[in-house]
Image: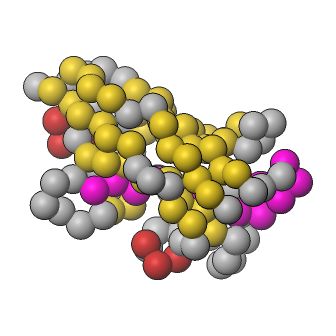
Amino acid sequence: VQLQASGGGLVQAGGSLRLSCEPSGLTFRTFGDYAVGWFRQAPGKEREFVAGMSRSTRALSYADSVKGRFTISTDASKSTVNLQMNRLNPEDTAVYYCAATARGPYNSVMKRLLDYQYWGQGTLVTVSS
């Protein structure tokens, strides 16, 4: 399984961006068997959980810092995972990574880096003040 993240760019504070993560090596039938998540890594900081979706039941979870502003969703027809980011602020500047795993409970959102088997290459989001 390989993940391709896209949609990053430069945006002014208060603006929006939509990130997408497209996996290869998965079929529509198997896509629901994977938990998916978005993480980010700002310069000089550790990679952190942003948003995630569990396997099967598609339960959702968000980091406190993005709740109410970011929305994770899937497009089953395309087997993509999206992250809609609204009301961006400079603290959201980071490289954003998508991740997927076929492991773990069906109804739990994975929040740790080591929970995930597959990672995308990252897409840079820069928010100017």
**Image quadrant where residue 16 sits:** top left
* Residue 16 is covered by the magenta coloring: no
Q: 89 left or right of 8?
A: left
Residue at horizontal 44 percent and vertical 73 percent from the top? 112
Left-right relation of 4 to 10: right
Q: In the figure, 79 relative to 117: above or below?
A: above
Number of disc labels: 0
Which colour assignment does the render follow?
Answer: secondary structure
Q: Residue furthest right?
A: 29
x and y, in percent, of residue 70 in the image: 43, 38
Q: Is residue 29 magenta?
A: yes
Q: Which residue: 75% across, 37% down?
A: 78
Quadrant of the image for the C terminus? top left
Visible residue check, residue 32: no
Name the image quarter holding residue 75. Answer: top right
Chain part drawn in magenta: 28-41
Q: Locate residue 122 relative to residue 48 in the image: left or right.
A: right
Residue at left offset 48%, top offset 37%: 6
Residue 114 image offset from top left, x and y in percent: 46, 78
Q: Is residue 27 left or right of residue 51?
A: right
- Which residue is at a point 31% across and 48% down the rendered structure image? 95
Using the image, determine if residue 117 lies above or below residue 87. Answer: below
Write down the quadrant of residue 74 in the picture: top right
Observer-nearest of 24 and 50: 24
Q: Is residue 93 above or below residue 47?
A: above
Q: Position of residue 77 (x, y in %)?
A: 80, 36
Q: Is residue 91 visible?
A: yes
The quarter of the picture where the N terminus appears is bottom right
Between 6 and 68, the one lying in front of the other is 6
Q: Position of residue 103 (x, y in %)?
A: 67, 77
